[in-house]
Amino acid sequence: ISQVLFKNVVFSHLHWPNVKLTDTVFEQCDLSNVDFSQCFMDRVQLINCKLVGINMTEASLRNVVFDHCNAAYAVLRFFKCKKSKFHNTSFAEADLYSATLTDVSFACCNLDRIQFSGTKLAGIDLSSCQFYQLALTPEDLRGCIIAPAQAIALANIFGVVIKE
């Protein structure tokens, strides 16, 4: 699928594993629980979309923009993402287990209770994002850029007691 604009479309019970999307825009669409496993996206924009529970297991994304989307409970296991932007998007309780993120930016996203285990966050700036709990290891977090207030939340995740 190439050079298509989907606007105000509700995709229900859609199974599109292995689909290739290029130069495509989804605007104000409902893609909740859609199966995009093993899909390939290049130069795709998802704007003001509902992506609750979307399955993008083993998907490959390049030059993709998620802007003002709700991707709570999204399944992005073994996801490969390059040169993409996530802006004002909720990934609350999403699963990014063993994802590969290269030249990816997160700005003002809700990442609370996201599963980042096995996902290297080195060089990724989460400082403008919101989270209270994350599932990850110290090795996953090494080199990640965070705000000072987030350091307290991360210390609590790892069982560190902070005394004033």
Image: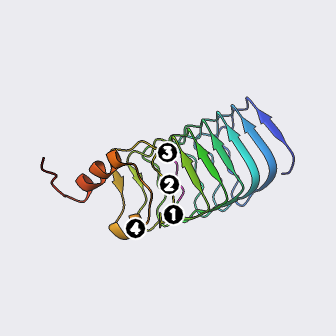
**In terms of image quadrants, where is residue 29?**
top right
Numbered label attached to residue 123: 1
The spot of residue 4 in percent (x, y) is 85, 43
Q: Earlier in the sequence, mark 3 or mark 2?
A: 3
User: In the rendered picture of this protein, how many numbered marks are placed on residues?
Assistant: 4
Q: Amino acid at mark 4?
A: Arg
Q: Secondary structure at mark 2?
A: loop
Q: Amino acid at mark 1?
A: Gly
Please tell me whether residue 70 belongs to the stretch shown in magenta.
no
Q: CA distance from mark 4 to mark 2?
A: 12 Å
Q: Amino acid at mark 2?
A: Asp
Q: Earlier in the sequence, mark 3 or mark 1?
A: 3
The spot of residue 1 in percent (x, y) is 83, 51
Q: Amino acid at mark 3?
A: Phe
Q: Earlier in the sequence, mark 4 or mark 3?
A: 3
Left or right of 118 in this view: 99: right
At horizontal 37% and vertical 48% (from top left) the residue drawn is 113
**In terms of image quadrants, where is residue 30?**
top right
* Residue nearest the viewer, comparing 50 with 142: 142
What secondary structure is the stretch in magenta mostly built from? loop
Q: Earlier in the sequence, mark 4 or mark 1?
A: 1
